[in-house]
Image: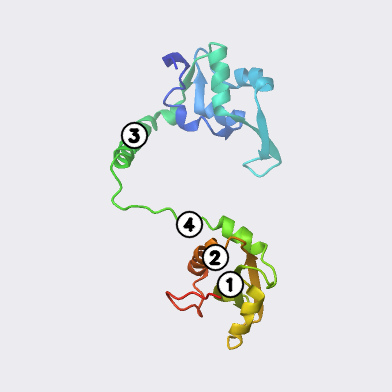
Amino acid sequence: MSEHRRIPDWLAPYKNEWMALSSMCALFNIEGRRASLPWLKEIQPRLRCVTKPARNGSGVSRYYLVKQVWACALAHCVKLTPSAEITGENDKMRFLEKEVTSLREQLFKASMKPPTVRIVRPPDWTEMLAAMLCATEPKPLPGIYFLISEGVVTYVGQSQNVLYRMHGHRGKTFDTVKMIHEPDLTRLLVEEGRWIGAFSPRDNVTGKVATV
């Protein structure tokens, strides 16, 4: 962007603010004019505005975007100059801009350093949760089954005949049984391990899986 089209440094901190026309008169002057308000009223129909409660609490007022007013000034070859009210803030703004620039440089340098800790991507349980939503009552089919007590999975197992396998759990306490049909028998042990890792059921013995 060419220098003359870049918003001036003194106006940049205010560019995204919405102000009433009267407030803008306190923000800048128009070179060659004693008052800014007449020119602002001329371009008012071309400006986008929002209606908000007046700051003095009486009724509502219209507010205009500062950077749009600056764009109109650029298009009309009108030069805006800082008012006396904000001229005293220039030194403070320059100091803050230098501080922000310094912080950005530090952050950029830090981002170029290699990480000191290896971040492992957590497992994606989306597919498993979707499967759980489709779980059914136990059937005489191969699959993974879940013994559930008061909404908590207390045991995960696998069997080639889940309904028949329930006879072996008469000593356990549970109120619900759900199963996920898995016709691929070679995947049963793998899937059982995944579900045990997901729920860590209290009744599963570490390193031991149920088979039938």
What's the CA distance linking mark 4 and mark 3?
39 Å
Q: Quadrant of the C terminus?
A: bottom right
202 left or right of 142?
left
Q: Earlier in the sequence, mark 3 or mark 1?
A: 3
Q: Are marks 3 and 1 in contact (CB under 8 Å)?
A: no
Q: Is residue 35 visible?
A: no
Q: Are marks 4 and 2 in contact (CB under 8 Å)?
A: no
Q: Which residue in the protein does label 3 denote?
A: 101
What's the CA distance linking mark 1 and mark 4?
25 Å
Q: Position of residue 106 (x, y in %)?
A: 30, 39
9 left or right of 182?
left
Query: Which element type, helix, strand or loop, lies under badge 2?
Result: helix
Q: Are marks 1 and 2 in contact (CB under 8 Å)?
A: yes
Q: Are marks 4 and 3 in contact (CB under 8 Å)?
A: no
Residue drawn 60% across the image and 73% down it? 146
- Up-down: is 146 above or below 13? below
Q: Which residue in the protein does label 1 denote?
A: 159
Q: Which residue in the protein does label 2 denote?
A: 188
